[in-house]
Image (cartoon, rainbow, N blue to C red):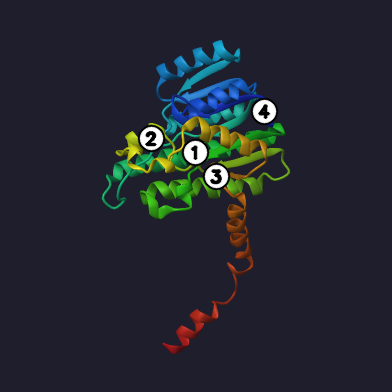
Amino acid sequence: MSSSPTIGTALVTGASSGIGAVYADRLARRGHDLLLVARNAARLEELAVRLRAETGRAVEILPADLQQPADVARVAQRLREDARIRLLVNNAGVAVAGSATAADPARLDAMVQLNTVAAMRLAVAAGAAFKARGGGVLVNIASVLGLAPEMFNAVYAATKAFMLVLSQGLAAELRDSGVRVQAVLPGATRTAIWEGAGTSVDALPPEMVMEVDEMVDAALAGLDAGELVTIPSLPDVGDWSKLDAARLALGPNLSRNRAADRYRAGARAA
């Protein structure tokens, strides 16, 4: 197993199951001590006991509900103050399936609070803390739906687009600081998030669904390769490179002192 770019304590959110639990397992085997964050303290402790026994690493649990601002503030404070923490896997999230316009607004609010507000608070706290420590790794779990919002609930897709853009912006801000940023964009992955969203992953074609172990292993390979954006299922990384290059090519024309001719011509005709 490869070593992570920066060895130290890894804080993993949403660590009680699914993607977070597999990250915890893999990072412990790479030599990291762990600080595991999730709501379910019993599941966290069960995972911690297993990983201590199997890897010999120090594993601490920090039960927290990241839909509650006070708990987010508590975890962010730990990121800022605990100099041992050198890696954050910003993974906690929920989904809502179906039409956004027909969804319960309270469920959408709760999803935005966890997927964007809490994730942003932790990412910013980690970025500032790692910069002050001279290095660290910030891994933000986004989704391919941030690139394909037509395929699922619009608000969920928007929260994942937020995570991608946040990662790109923080990577630019933290360039040359010793802090690495990675956005991971999984496709459909077999985890319990589907049940919580009110749908079943088994409704998708099997060829679209990746097992969680394979997804996390691919994401870590992307981290080892120095990728800013990792899309585990994308066969040709050049496709992402072309998309990103096209985005950057828009830059000189995104903000100018005159409207484009096609809009000015229309105004004169009116």
Residue named by callout 3: 231
Which amino acid lies under the numbered mark 1 shown in the image of this protein? Ala
**Mark 1 or mark 2, whichever is nearer to me:** 2
Which amino acid lies under the numbered mark 4 shown in the image of this protein? Ser
**Mark 1 or mark 3, whichever is nearer to me:** 3
Q: Can I make out residue 125 in this image?
A: no
Within 10 angstroms of label 4, few (less than 14), some, or many (20 or more) residues? Answer: few
* Label 2 close to label 3 by CB (< 8 Å): no
Q: Position of residue 72 (x, y in %)?
A: 47, 32
Q: Position of residue 74 (x, y in %)?
A: 49, 27
Residue named by callout 4: 2
Q: Which of 140 and 116 is in front in this view?
A: 140
**Mark 2 or mark 3, whichever is nearer to me:** 3
Q: Is residue 165 above or below residue 22?
A: below
Q: Give the total number of marks visible in the rendering.
A: 4
* Label 4 close to label 2 by CB (< 8 Å): no
Structural distance between the alpha carbons of marks 4 and 3: 19 Å
Residue named by callout 2: 193
Q: Residue 119 carries which label?
A: 1
Q: Where is residue 153 in the image (x, y as percent from the top left)?
A: 35, 49
Structural distance between the alpha carbons of marks 1 and 3: 19 Å
Q: Nearer the viewer, residue 30 or 84?
A: 30
Quadrant showing the C terminus? bottom left
Which amino acid lies under the numbered mark 3 shown in the image of this protein? Ile
Q: Quadrant of residue 44?
A: top left
